[in-house]
Image (cartoon, rainbow, N blue to C red):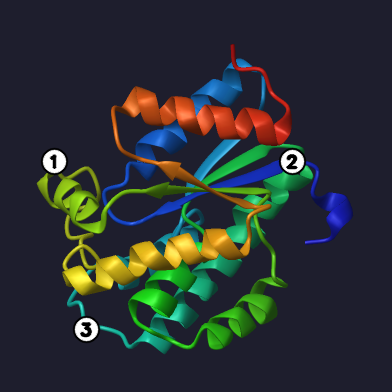
């Protein structure tokens, strides 16, 4: 995306299963709208018609349905369509785009979770979307077993059958958690780790504090 066309702001939420991303995405969107910001709420994989079709291939079915390399290629195919059809046009119109997951999830899930070569993923990132990154990434952090328990115990709010990643083993989810923390450590100017323990309201206050500081906003 040409820099001159990036007039809006792109915020992403990341984290393992059960960290409360989807809830916090909606709270932040509603809060920004109270400041008269035009907000586009989206998700990955998905966020455009083509990407939503690819989503079904990724989040449903047997846990061994794809090898790691195939998953990366599917994610970036969906991501490219999502950016071209949804994210980039919105940013060019000075809108605030908030996404439940983005490219860091591919690095964490396929790179750290599936132990895939990180350089391979980075090369696909650069080739397919010109290395495009968010203005701010909030990584919601919980102990892996706590988040997984939340995800497995909650009422099913996702489409039926979208639990492929939740059914992967505990070791996978521990590697996933450490992967997100490592991503944040490597890119401190973009990524902020947010403690996801506590009530929805407590976590939301932490999120708002980060966003307010990053973009010089007043939510009071």
User: Which tag, 1 or 3, sits closer to the chain's start?
Assistant: 3
**Is disc 2 placed on a helix, strand or loop?**
loop
Q: Is residue 81 visible?
A: no
Q: What is the crowding at mark 3: few (fewer than 14 residues within 10 Å), some, or many (at least 20)? A: few
Question: Callout 1: 10 Å neighbours few (<14), some, many (20+)?
Answer: few
Q: Which mark is residue 8?
A: 2
The foreground one among 135 and 178 is: 178
- State which quarter of the image contains the N terminus: bottom right
Numbered disc 1: secondary structure: loop
Q: Is residue 46 above or below residue 40?
A: below
Q: Is residue 60 above or below residue 35?
A: below
Where is mark 3, residue-wise? Answer: 64
Compared with residue 147, is residue 218 higher up or lower down, i.e. above or below?
Answer: above
Q: Along the polypeptide, which appears first: circle 3 or circle 2?
A: 2
Q: Residue at x 61, y 42 (%)?
A: 97
Cα–Cα span, label 1 and label 3? 25 Å
7 in relation to 33, above or below = below
Q: Position of residue 111 (x, y in %)?
A: 44, 78
Asked if residue 198 shows in the view, the reply is: yes
Q: CA distance from mark 3 to mark 2?
A: 39 Å
The numbered disc on residue 62 is none
Residue 208 x %, y %: 54, 28
Q: Are marks 1 and 3 in contact (CB under 8 Å)?
A: no
In this view, which residue lies farthest toward the right?
A: 4
Q: Is residue 108 left or right of residue 36?
A: left
Q: Which residue is mark 1?
A: 155
In the rendered image, which quarter is residue 94 located in? top right
Q: Callout 2 environment at 10 Å: few (<14), some (14 to 19), or many (20+)?
A: many
């Amino acid at each position: 995306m040409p820099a001159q066309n990036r007039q809006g702001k792109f915020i992403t939420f990341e984290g393992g299963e059960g960290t409360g991303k989807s809830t916090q995405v909606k709270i932040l969107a509603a809060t920004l709208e109270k400041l008269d910001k035009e907000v586009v709420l989206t998700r990955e994989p998905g966020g455009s018609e083509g990407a939503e079709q690819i989503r079904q291939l990724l989040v449903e079915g047997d846990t061994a349905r794809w090898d790691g390399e195939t998953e990366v290629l599917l994610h970036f195919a969906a991501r490219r369509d999502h950016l071209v059809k949804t994210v980039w046009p919105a940013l060019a119109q000075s809108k605030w785009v908030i996404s439940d997951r983005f490219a860091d999830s591919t690095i964490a899930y396929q790179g750290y979770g599936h132990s895939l070569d990180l350089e391979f993923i980075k090369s696909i990132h650069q080739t397919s979307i010109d290395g495009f990154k968010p203005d701010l990434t909030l990584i919601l952090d919980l102990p892996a077993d706590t988040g997984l328990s939340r995800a497995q115990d909650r009422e099913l709010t996702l489409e039926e059958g979208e639990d492929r990643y939740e059914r992967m083993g505990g070791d996978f989810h521990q590697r996933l958690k450490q992967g997100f923390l490592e991503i944040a450590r490597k890119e401190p100017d973009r990524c902020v780790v947010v403690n996801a323990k506590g009530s929805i309201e407590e976590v939301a206050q932490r999120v708002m504090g980060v966003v307010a500081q990053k973009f010089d906003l007043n939510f009071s």
